[in-house]
Image (spheres, coloured by chain):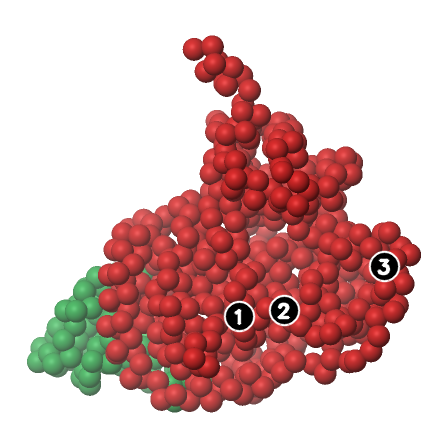
Chain colours: A red, B green
């Protein structure tokens, strides 16, 4: 894992000193709220529906046990004893007081964390594949380059007042677990003729105008990355629209100008920006890479795992859903579900954070990950330790065996917290999870991603959910539109709308209708929901959801 | 009237030469490093409009070595960004100078410290 250099530590300390002064100047009136707003946003402080919210960066989703413990401490000391893990691998504290925030930031700095650039019109926290360094299918660990980008984008003088926010995601595998085609820039580490480089994808995004990113260059040599990124953001900073914030994101700039024109402009700008780089960044990258060396994996038998798997059906069910193949023999990647049926997706109590930190320290080389699917990952676990881990998780409400299943729902905070929301998300997620748990059908249903957003800004990624749910306000009444067929992986696709939306009291039933239809028409239990949808299209689902309409049409 | 902010604090505008004024929406291809002006002044219509930072950097990348000034709604917290992007000084209104006095600007006069970009560029 990366450990701060003296430079990093001094930077964060200085930044915290500045923000403390800015908070004081806001309180004494020398900064107006309009002027304070971009400054607090650059430091992760939002004003929500009921209170301030502090969004803490978890760069590329990687946490040490000590960091997780400090998050638990912060939750108890300055918040209400819990935190919320987000789809951008961050953690949010929902109830801080403005005057406490500088102290919270200092507490974060003690464990080499910060909240810098987790909001505002700037380059946000860089996200990465949550299985980085552990996945069996990986070309290279994407976290070193993500760390390099974190340093480059931090406090970048040109890019603190961009047309809009800017999100970068990196993966090192062909399988995309970082949703790179739904980011302003998506990077995929790849190898060509023995040389490492990047596929650079630009202009993806969800929100009110969802777009799948387009490939800007198929192979960018490794050493060119920072000046190339600088060229992209520089071009967009001048070309991006500032007359309408809903048209400001780079996806619109790419859409309006065309990918070929953007490529031409970026190539021209790159010729200018690259002259400013001496190549020292590549030396720094090599030093960062050394810090991400894989832990010393042990060689030992997995009998304890095999025995528990055969003897304990509860353990077996959890192992079947929550484990993923690891690159090392005898190891597994463990996903800890933060989606207990009926709980708020992504929330963890301080006690649960400490339990996960302890498990990471004892069994998982001290490392944890936050997934964009709002779960926690222990990336390196020897299988023989899994029965003990499972037993501890069970005692703390963390052993839900539902990763990838219908109750493993991504949901934005919605109207329970967010000032932008037009409908509730969390209660809908809770009701769906509870309903299918009562029916004991989710294992039969299999792989199915439901993603819920409480407004068109799409923080809940509903466009790329197999079943996407979008909560809107229709004349003061919550109304939920459904999309089907979205895909967040390397086969990225946007879902299609089924038709008219459903009121809150009918949305769970509508989801059940969709699932029943799938179970009826799938060719076998092996055909997943998304495969069935791709085969049959919308028609059978539409017919089931809107029977009256179909009858009318038949009669006409 | 206006106030000129430099690393040494507030001062009067004593410049009398030829000024080239550039709007924040100046097209990048129109930026000429070989201007005859003694001072290039880039407008900041709003502190949220960061185009001037990129324009300044492009001018410097293209070889402009003359005096470069940011004018308008630049706030004290942006002083370090302005300096790092290539500006020499910032021109603000008396009103803004009264609301954000010299000490708040001097707080960021150490703009060369803690700079990731210069470290990465080498």
| Residue A3 appears anywhere in the view | no
Query: In the image, residue A340 lies at what x, y percent?
Result: 75, 48
Element type at marker 3? helix
Element type at marker 2? loop
Chain bearing mark 3: A
Q: Nearer the viewer, mark 1 or mark 3?
A: 3
Compared across the picture, whether A96 is left or right of A262 comes to right
Label 1 close to label 2 by CB (< 8 Å) = yes
Compared across the picture, whether A98 is left or right of A326 comes to left
Q: Earlier along the polypeptide chain: callout 1 or callout 3?
A: 1
Q: Earlier along the polypeptide chain: callout 3 or callout 2?
A: 2
**Vertical placement of residue A407 versus B121, above or below:** above
Q: Which residue is mark 3?
A: A309
Element type at marker 1? loop
Q: Which residue is mark 2?
A: A135
Q: Which residue is mark 1?
A: A172
The residue at 82%/55% (across/down) is: A316
Chain bearing mark 1: A
The residue at 21%/77% (across/down) is: B59
Q: Earlier along the polypeptide chain: callout 1 or callout 2?
A: 2
């Amino acid at each position: 894992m990366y450990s701060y250099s003296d430079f990093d530590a001094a930077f964060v300390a200085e930044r915290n000193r500045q923000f403390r002064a800015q908070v004081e100047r806001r309180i004494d009136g020398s900064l107006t709220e309009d002027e304070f707003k971009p400054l607090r946003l650059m430091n992760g402080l939002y004003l929500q529906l009921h209170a301030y919210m502090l969004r803490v960066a978890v760069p590329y989703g990687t946490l040490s046990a000590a960091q997780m413990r400090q998050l638990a401490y912060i939750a108890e000391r300055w918040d209400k004893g819990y935190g919320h893990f987000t789809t951008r691998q961050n953690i949010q504290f929902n109830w801080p007081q403005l005057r406490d925030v500088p102290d919270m930031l200092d507490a974060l700095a003690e464990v080499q964390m910060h909240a810098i650039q987790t909001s505002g019109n700037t380059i946000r926290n860089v996200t990465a594949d949550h299985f980085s360094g552990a996945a069996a299918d990986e070309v290279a660990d994407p976290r070193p380059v993500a760390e390099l980008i974190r340093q480059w984008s931090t406090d970048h003088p040109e890019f603190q007042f961009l047309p809009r926010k800017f999100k970068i995601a990196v993966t090192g595998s062909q399988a995309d677990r970082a949703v790179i085609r739904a980011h302003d820039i998506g990077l995929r580490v790849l190898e060509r003729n023995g040389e490492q480089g990047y596929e650079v994808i630009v202009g993806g995004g969800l929100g009110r105008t969802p777009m799948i990113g387009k490939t800007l260059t198929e192979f960018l040599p490794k050493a060119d990355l920072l000046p190339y990124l600088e060229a992209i953001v520089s071009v967009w900073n001048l070309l991006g629209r500032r007359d309408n914030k809903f048209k400001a994101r780079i996806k619109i700039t790419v859409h309006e100008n065309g990918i070929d024109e953007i490529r031409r402009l970026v190539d021209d700008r790159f010729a200018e920006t690259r002259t400013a780089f001496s190549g020292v960044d590549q030396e720094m990258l090599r030093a960062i890479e050394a810090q991400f060396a894989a832990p010393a994996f042990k060689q030992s038998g997995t009998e304890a795992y095999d025995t528990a798997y055969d003897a304990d059906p509860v353990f077996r069910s959890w192992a079947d859903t929550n484990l993923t193949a690891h690159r090392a023999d005898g190891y597994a990647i463990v996903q800890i579900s933060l989606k207990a049926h009926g709980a708020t997706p992504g929330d963890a109590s301080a006690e649960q954070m400490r339990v996960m930190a302890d498990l990471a320290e004892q069994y998982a080389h001290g490392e944890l990950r936050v997934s964009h699917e709002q779960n926690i990952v222990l990336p390196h676990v020897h299988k023989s330790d899994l029965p003990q881990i499972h037993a501890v998780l069970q005692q703390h409400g963390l052993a839900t065996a539902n990763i990838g299943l219908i109750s493993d729902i991504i949901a934005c905070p919605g109207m329970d917290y967010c000032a932008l929301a037009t409908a509730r998300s969390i209660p809908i997620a809770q009701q769906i999870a509870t309903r299918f748990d009562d029916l004991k059908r989710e294992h039969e249903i299999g792989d199915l991603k439901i993603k819920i957003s409480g407004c068109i800004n799409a923080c809940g990624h509903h466009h790329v959910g197999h079943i996407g749910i979008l909560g809107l306000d229709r004349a003061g009444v919550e109304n939920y539109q459904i999309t089907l067929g979205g895909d967040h992986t390397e086969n990225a696709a946007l879902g299609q709308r089924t038709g008219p939306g459903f009121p809150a009291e009918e949305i769970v039933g509508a989801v059940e209708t969709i699932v029943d239809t799938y179970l009826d028409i799938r060719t076998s239990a092996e055909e997943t929901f998304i495969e069935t949808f791709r085969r049959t299209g919308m028609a059978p689902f539409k017919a089931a959801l809107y029977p009256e309409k179909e009858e009318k049409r038949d009669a006409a | 009237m206006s106030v000129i902010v430099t690393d040494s604090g507030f001062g009067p505008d004593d410049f009398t030469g030829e000024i080239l004024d550039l709007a924040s929406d100046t097209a990048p291809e129109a930026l000429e490093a070989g201007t005859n002006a003694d001072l290039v002044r880039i407008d900041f219509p709003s502190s949220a409009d960061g185009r001037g930072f990129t324009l300044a950097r492009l001018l410097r990348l293209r070889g402009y070595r003359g005096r470069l000034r940011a004018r308008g709604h630049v706030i004290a917290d942006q002083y370090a960004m302005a300096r790092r992007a290539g500006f020499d000084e910032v021109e603000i209104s008396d009103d803004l100078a009264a609301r954000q006095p010299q000490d708040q600007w001097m707080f960021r006069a150490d703009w060369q410290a803690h700079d990731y970009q210069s470290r990465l560029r080498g």
